[in-house]
Image (tube, grey):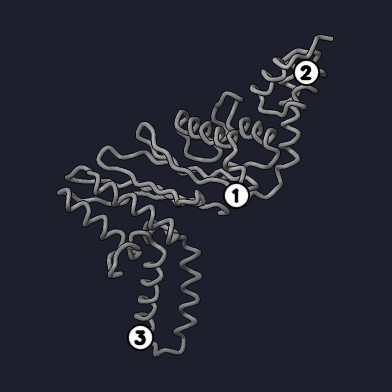
Amino acid sequence: MAEITAKMIKELRELTGMGMSDCKKALVDAEGNVEEAEMILRKKGLDKAAKKADRATGQGVVSVREKDGVVVCLQIECEQEPTTKNERFLALIDKVFDAAFASKVATIEELVAAPTTEGTVADSVTAVIGVIGENVVIKNIASFAIPENGTYGAYSHFNGKSGAICVVEIEGGAADEEFKTAANDVCMHAVATRPVALNRAGVPEDLVRKEKEVFLEEIKNKPENIQEKILEGKLAKFYGEKCLEEQIFVKDPEGKLTVGAMIDAAAKKIGGQAKIVDFARLELGN
């Protein structure tokens, strides 16, 4: 049998991230063949990943990055808070972002199939699970192209548990630093207030129907000639709470300025008009 040297063990550890004892055992089983030992460890990692696939992932990271005219927000979950500082986990986040930008993906299905040095993003996740010994899940992705006549906003909460991105189109002006700050503030606001849609058209029909049922029950004893007006008022309040554009901007000291009006005011300062065309909010556990 070939001699198993410390150099060989170190090389295999750098390739796989596995522990020293695992690397030594794999080299012994492979009779000193590093490539074969790496395959043994990869298979071991697959087995570990399969066993941990059903374990809950309550921790993780929500992160935002921009590259080449695209802004991406990723939600990657793990089991324990300390894992979010693990160098292998952090390297995986970099790798997933690289794959998202390179392959221009927009869905989880596209993302996990995107190529990486391990094969695909799914393979890279499996490899990390084998090393750190706990379940890791790419839970969500939001990806938007930044309009040529506009800009984007981004915000990651200080604890890394939630984040948001938005894209804003501008007509008749160009975004400056102040307008960019306003776009970022939209995302900060969204993280804080949890809107379900950008505007009324985006609110799920089932949610509206359920709210109407509740409101109709509340007003059934009111005079019939005013029921419709009361219902309209209740629905307006509902939309004001759920739609990003209609929500009262959290940084407005008077509590009167909506998010849509705030962006309008910021656009006027640069001599144009603007509208939020899309946004996404991601949060661990959702």
Between marks 2 and 3 in the image, the one whose residue lies nearer the viewer:
2
Q: What element carries label 3?
A: helix
Q: What residue type is labelled 3?
A: Ile
Query: x, y (%) of residue 207?
Result: 49, 65
Which of the two residues, 5 or 29, is positioned nearer the viewer here?
5
- Left or right of residue 106: residue 35: right
Of pointers 2 and 3, the one earlier in the residue sequence: 2
Q: In this view, does 249 lie above or below 113?
A: below
Q: Which amino acid does label 2 sit on?
A: Leu
**Image point 22% across, 53% down: which residue?**
266
**Image point 65% across, 47% down: which residue?**
79
Q: Categorize mark 2 by other alpha carbons within 10 Å: few (<14), some (14-19), many (20+).
A: many
User: Where residue 27 is drawn, which disc sits there?
Assistant: 2
Residue 41 location, quadrant? top right
Query: x, y (%) of residue 213?
Result: 49, 75
Q: Is residue 79 above or below residue 37?
A: below
Q: Is mark 2 on a helix, strand or loop?
A: helix
User: Where residue 226 is drawn, which disc sits there?
Assistant: 3
Which residue is the site of mark 1?
59
Question: What is the CA distance from the residue labelled 1 to the residue labelled 2?
Answer: 34 Å
Q: Categorize mark 3 by other alpha carbons within 10 Å: few (<14), some (14-19), many (20+).
A: few
Quadrant of the image containing the N terminus = top right
Residue 48 location, quadrant? top right
Of pointers 1 and 2, the one earlier in the residue sequence: 2
